[in-house]
Amino acid sequence: MDIKAFGQFLRWMRKKTNMSQMDLALSAGCTMPTISKIENGQEFIGKKLFDKLNEIFEGFGFSYDELSMGRIFKFKQAREELLKAIKQGREEDIENKIDKLQEYLEEKGGLQETTIKNYEVKTGDDEIYEWERINYDSDDEVDKQYFMFAHLVRSRQNGMTLEKFLDEAIGIFELRRKIPDYNDIPDVKLSNIEYELFFVIAKTHLAMGNDDTAELIFKGLLCNKCYLDSPKVKERYLEISAVMASLLLDRKDFKGAYECLSFIFGEYISSFDTQVIYSALKVQHEYCQRNNDDDGVKIIDNFFISTDNLMTHMLKIYRFNQMS
C-alpha cells in the first residue's frame, strides 16, 4: 500500500465526516500525533487501528476497498516468513516461502491492474482525489529484493563463492538506491530487507577475513538510531551481539566479548519468558518417568541444574554491571 496515498484518503474521509484529528483519535483509541503521522504518510498504519478506523468510517458509508488490510498484512507476513526461512537455512522451506510470496504478488498485480482501470474510468470526473491514484510501484523493487536475496542465499548454499555472493548482495541492495558508505550506517534509515542485506554483507566480510570492515558494519547497525521504535530492535541487537562476541573473542578482546555476552544474557534474563519452556520440560520429565526412560529423566534433571546455575551466575554479573 502507498502510505502517502492512504494518508490522503484518511484525511479526506475525516474531513468529509467533519471530524478533527483529535475527534478521530479519541474514537479510534489512539493519539492525535498518530493520526497526524498517518495522514502525512509518515507512519504505516497497524492492522488493529486500520480495522477500528474502517469501523468508524463505515458508519458514515465510507470504506477503504482498494486493497484490504488483510491482504496487505498477508503480503508483509509472506515477506517475514521468507526472511525467517532464510535465517533458518532450510532450502526446501525457502523454496516454499518463495512460492507463497510469488502467489500473493500475482494477486497484488491483479489488484493493481484493476485499480488503474478504475482510475482511468474516473478521469472524466471533476472530483478526483489523490488517494484514488493508489499504486504499488513503490513496493515492486522491495519485492524483487526479497526474491533475489532468497535465491542468492540458495546459490550460496549450493557453492557460490564468497566474493560472488558479496557482489550480488550489494547489487540487490542497490536495486532501490546506492548502498550508503559504511561509515554512514548509523544515520541511515534501513528497511527490513536492507538491514538483512547489510547483516549478511558484514558476515561475508567476516568470513573472507575482512574483520575491520565487518566490525564497521556491525557497529554501524548497533549504533543505528533510526529503528529504535521497531519491535525488531532487540532481536537485531541480540543477533549482532552474538556475531560480535565471536569476532572479538577471536581477536582476544575478552572485555569486548564479555560485554556482548553480558548484553545477550541480560536481555534474555530480563525480557524473555522462559516459563513455557520450563513447563514443557516438566511435562516431558513426567513423560519420561512414566515410560521408565531413566536416561531422559537424568538429562532433563541435569539440564535444569545446569541452566539454574548458569542463569544465577549470569544474573549476578548482569545486576552487578547494572549497579556499577
Image: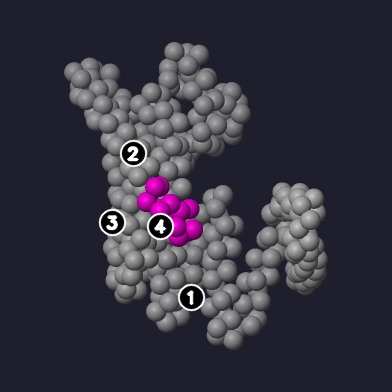
Q: Could you say whether the residue bearing mark 1 is in a helix, strand or loop?
A: helix
Do the numbered discs 3 and 4 sit on residues whose CB atoms are within 8 Å? no
Q: Which amino acid does label 4 sit on?
A: Glu
Query: For the residues marked 4 and 1, what is the alpha-carbon distance in whole angstroms?
Result: 28 Å
Instruction: Work out how far the residue at label 2 is from the one at label 3, CA to CA, in angstroms.
Output: 22 Å
Q: Check disc 1 and report the residue beneath it.
A: 215
Residue drawn at x 50%, y 62% as measured from the top left: 224
Helix, strand or loop status at disc 3: loop
- Precedes in sequence: disc 4 or disc 1: 4
Residue drawn at 45 percent across, 60 percent down: 89
Q: Which of marks 2 and 1 is nearer the N terminus?
A: 2
Foreground disc of the pair 2, 3 = 2
Q: In which quarter of the image is the N terminus?
A: top left
Q: Is mark 4 on a helix, strand or loop?
A: helix
Q: What residue type is labelled 1?
A: Glu
Residue that carries the numbered disc 3 in the rendered image: 175
Q: Residue at x 28, y 63 (%)?
A: 171
Mark-to-mark CA distance, 3 and 4: 24 Å
Magenta stretch in the rendered image: 83-97
Percent x, y for residue 203? 44, 71
